[in-house]
Image: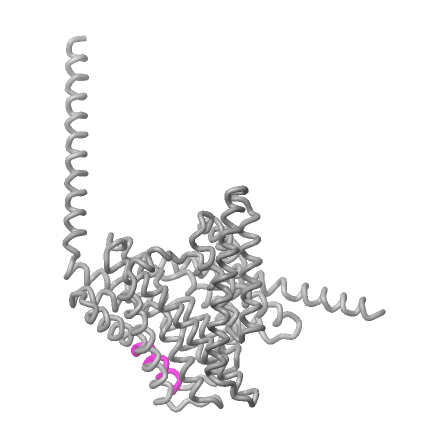
Amino acid sequence: MDAKEIVSYFSKIELFQILMPLALVFCLAKFLGLVARKLQMPQVVGEIAAGLILGPCVLNFIDINNPQYGLSVRSIAEIGVIMLMFSAGLGTNLKELLKVGPKAFLIACAGVVVPLASGAGVYYLFGFDNGNRFFEALVVGTILAATSVSITVQALKELGYLRTKVGNTILSAAIIDDIIGMVVLTFVITLSDNGEKGHQENIGVICLKIAAFFAIAVVLGFLLFKGFKWLENRRPHTRTIPIFAMAFCFFLSYCAETYFGIADITGAYAAGIIFCELKSASYIEEKIEVCLYMFFGPVFFASVGLKSNLKGMSFELLGFVAVITITALIAKIIGCGAMAKLCRFSKSDSLKIGVGMMTRGEVALIVADKGITAGIINKMMNFAVVPLIITSSLLTPIILKILYSIWPDNKVKAVKDRESQQKDMKYSQMYKDDEKEDVVIIKTKVKE
């Protein structure tokens, strides 16, 4: 048996070995995702739970460190992260972002600074040390800084307050919040890598690298945007556009990580923003979402649970999870709410903005995953993220509903009342018309 045959044999073994873990992940992740949705929780909670059950925490059916298939699972999960951030970039509304402007930016900055400082402080308070305590604390703080606005958007949509000033501010601030969080994460990982490699790169050089990356991305993005506009006019809503867009996403992610020392997810997010103003942006996002929903997404979110291990769990860590969850929720309300008040929002609107910004989701998971992959924080920190996502996802819609019942938006209320009156009048007229028709039918029958 020659070298090529040996390589081929082991490749087949690895492919064969990965099929069963993938089958288990897909089935259980889908089932628990549907259960989570029925319980009014994000589907991602069920997918993470699937990883926890299949991994070393409960059944230990899948070992993500297994040399036979572990590398393949981790690679698929990494592609899932990149596609997830690309999809998030595609969903960005630049016009809305620019319209709300400076206020949303200031609220987003406060929503990063206060949770980041609080999270780092709690980490120091509990005395954890994985070998590089300063950077560990920064990563934990960055996890707390990330915002997931999807739950808030759904809650505001159901309440009828999504397109209000408060709704637009929350939406825009959350987008800026994530961008700042990605930049902070890039700084932390880059500086940490420099420290481990034994050569401290000047922070000015790192800033220049990041600035150079974004400058090149803007120029390249402008040229590609023009090219894609021409392409979508010639071949609108064809699969050619999503394929080329995905290729550019992978290319920019690779360049960001390899040549600029920036996290690949930052490149993916930038690629999404470049294409977000295309007419085909929603079409591209739709095709990407299919791949995410069907394949890459469940593997990534399940991998969060698969990487977790209850061995070594202590009462100290459980206490840390409880404190960090409470701190994360309060820090967002204080940071974003206080800045909103300084930006001349009313007290009630400031509180609504603070509560609307406290949800955590995919970005927090991504930050934690990147911190663990980079070797900065311990994988046990995954246990701090999952309860935070569940708690914030459950509390945010409930608190927002209570706040809007106490302090309703009068303009929206007036519009709702007017629409309600118009509906009542319409139904009343329909009832009268039906009544007249019944009378005519009865008279006709009597004559007959």
- Residue 33, above or below 10: above
Q: How many marks?
A: 0
List the single residue furthest toward the top: 448
Name the dominant secondary structure of the magenta segment: helix
In the foreground, 115 or 172:
172
Q: Does 369 sit left or right of 323 as displayed?
A: right
Q: Is residue 26 left or right of residue 14?
A: left
Q: Nearer the viewer, residue 23 or 296?
A: 296
> Which residue is at 34% across, 65% downward?
174
Farthest residue in the right direction? Answer: 1
Nearer-the-camera pick, 189 or 4: 189
> Does any portion of residue 12 appear in the rendered image?
yes
Residue extent of the magenta highlight = 315-327
Quadrant position of residue 133: bottom left
Residue appearing at x 52%, y 88% in the figure: 200
Residue drawn at x 16%, y 52% as measured from the top left: 411
- Is 87 in front, or is 340? 340
What colour-coding does the image apply?
A: one colour
**Residue 52 appears at what percent x and percent y?**
48, 71
Q: Position of residue 219 (x, y in %)?
A: 50, 61
**Left or right of 321, for residue 310:** right
Does residue 311 appear in the picture of this structure?
A: no
Quadrant of the rendering where the C terminus is positioned: top left
Residue sitting at 52 percent across and 55 percent down? Answer: 224
Membership of 284 in magenta stretch: no
Residue 75 at x, y percent in the picture: 59, 68
Split into 4 quadrants, where in the image is the N terminus?
Answer: bottom right
- The image position of residue 28, as x and y in percent, is 50, 62
Q: Is residue 311 above or below residue 164?
A: below
Would residue 388 be found to the left or right of residue 50 on screen? left
